[in-house]
Image (cartoon, helix red, strand yellow):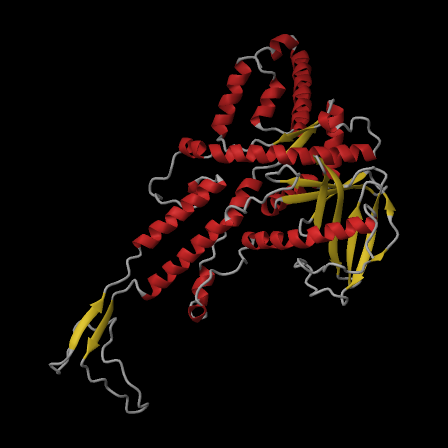
Amino acid sequence: MAEPRLSPGWWRDRLLDQWDSEQRERHRLLSYYDATHPLPTWMPKYRAAYADMLRMARTPWARLVVDTTAERITTQGFRIDSEEADAAVWRMFQQSRMDHLQRQVHREALITGSGYVSVWNDGAGGPKMMPESSLQVVHETAAGDMDKVVAAIKVWPDTVDGIWRLNLYLTDGIYRFWAPWNEGLLGDHQRSTAGLVPKGKVWTEMDPIANPGGEVPLVPFVVRRDWNGYGRSELTDLVPLINRFEVLTSDLLVASSYGAIKQRWATGLEIPIDPDTGEEVEPYNVAVDRLWISESPETKFGAVEATDLGPIVRTIDNVVAQISAVSRIPSSYFVQSELANPPSADSLEASEVNLISKIRERQDAFGAGWESVVAQALRLMGDTRADVSRIETIWQDPRSRSESQILDAAVKLGAVGVPTEAVWEHIGYSPTEIVRLRRMRSTDLLGRIAVSGALGTSPAQEIAPA
C-alpha cells in the first residue's frame, strides 16, 4: 500500500530511491580517490598474464587533484556584528572540533559532489556540529529554491546491534527506522552500502524526535551546484582522462618489459639436449656471449628491432597536460621535466592563477554552507543574530606566498595608512590571533610606560621611537 503523499513514509521511500542511485556513483568516485577503481580493460586472454602491470599502471591523480584543492580551503573565523559575537561563534565552532574536521567535509564534497554537517542541540553544552558521510546521506531541495533543504535521510549499518538504521530529517522532526540484516539486504560491509537497500523494503518505525529548530538539521556542502541545488564532483570530468592515462601507462609497461630490448633470432641451429633432464638447452647466453658460432652453413642470425617507446611517452604527456588543464592544477604538480632548472617562485605563482581562482569559487560555495550551519546553531540557542545574510565566513589566504612577499606587502599597506589590524589580517592572522596580538601590544605598551616612569623619562619620549 502506497504511503500518503508528504508523509514520513512517503519521504522515506522517495529519498531511498535517490539514495540507491546516488551512492553507486559516489562509491565509484571514491574508488578513484582511493586508487581502488577497476583496472584498465584488456582482452581477457592477456588480462591475467599482465595483471601485475595493470595494477602498477594505477596512479592516484584523483587524490592529488582533490587534496591540492582541499588543503588550501580552511575556515579561520566568522564575522557577525561584533567582536564578542565573532569570538563566541568561533568558540562554538571549536567546541565541535570543526576547526579540525572541516577539511573532511570539504574533501568529501570535492570527491562526491556533496558533503554534509548536522546541527543539533542535545542539551549538553550548546549546539553540536558534526560531519556526516556523503556515503550515508542524501537530501532534497525545495522546488524553485535550491538553498532550502526540505528533507534528508541518513542510512547506515549498526554493527553492534546487527541492524540497519535510517533517520529521516524533516522540518517538524526526525523519524527513525530500522531493518534487520537478513531481510533482503545484500552483504554486511560497513562501508560499501551502495545498492543494499532495495525498493519496497519494509522498515520498522521507532519513536520520532521533535525538531525544535523548525528546519532540516543537515546542511549540504555542494560543489559546482546546479539549478536544483545538487553538486557535481571535482572528479567527474577527470575519470575518462585518468582511465586513458592508465591504459597508456599499462601499454608502456608491457612494451618496455617485452619490446624495449632488441630481440635476436636464429634458424638452422642444432639445439643441444641436457642428458640429465632430456630437455632442450639454450645454445647461447644472450646476455653474456659476445660471439655466436655455428658450424652449420644453414644457420642464419637476425634481430627484431626494439619497440619505440617515444610515441607512447608523448601521448601520456599529452594526457597529463589535459588532466592539468581540466583540473586547473598547475602541470608542475604532476610532472617536473627539468629538475636541473626548476621554475622560479614568480613563475610558480603565475602558474597557480587558475588554481587560486577555482579555490576561491569553492570557498564561496562552502562559505554558504558554513554560514547556514552557524545560523542554525545560533537559532537553536535562541540568538537573534541568526540571520544567515549577516554572517560572513573568513577564509585563510589560499595563495602560496613567501615570507618576504608577505612582509613587504604589509609594510607598504601600513605606509599608505591601512589600519594595523587590517594589515595583520592581510598577513594571514586569524581573528583569534589578532585579538591575542592586540592584548600583547597593550601589555607591551603598559610595560614601556612603566619603564619610562622608573627611568624618569616621559612616556612620549620612550614610546615615540617605537
Q: Report whether residue 133 is seen.
A: yes
Q: What is the residue that sits farthest to the left in this orientation?
A: 297
Residue 80, x across and y down, in percent: 72, 25
In the visual, does 425 lie left or right of 276?
Answer: right
Query: Considering depth in this image, is 200 or 235 the residue closer to the camera?
Result: 200
Q: In this view, does 455 lie above or below 90?
A: above
Q: Report whether residue 292 is seen.
A: no
In the visual, does 128 lie left or right of 45?
Answer: right
Q: In this view, does 180 lie above or below 279?
A: above
Residue drawn at point x = 25 percent, y = 65 percent = 262
Residue 151, x across and y down, in percent: 76, 44
Q: Quadrant of residue 79?
A: top right
Query: Considering depth in this image, is 455 or 302 the residue closer to the camera?
Result: 302
Query: Considering depth in this image, is 162 or 92 the residue closer to the camera?
Result: 162
Query: Considering depth in this image, is 239 or 359 the residue closer to the camera?
Result: 239
Residue drawn at point x = 52 percent, y = 32 percent = 357
Quadrant in which the N terminus appears: bottom right
Q: What is the residue that sits farthest to the front in this orientation?
A: 1
Quadrant in which the C terminus appears: top right
Residue 289, x across and y down, in percent: 21, 73
Q: In which quarter of the image is residue 202?
A: bottom right
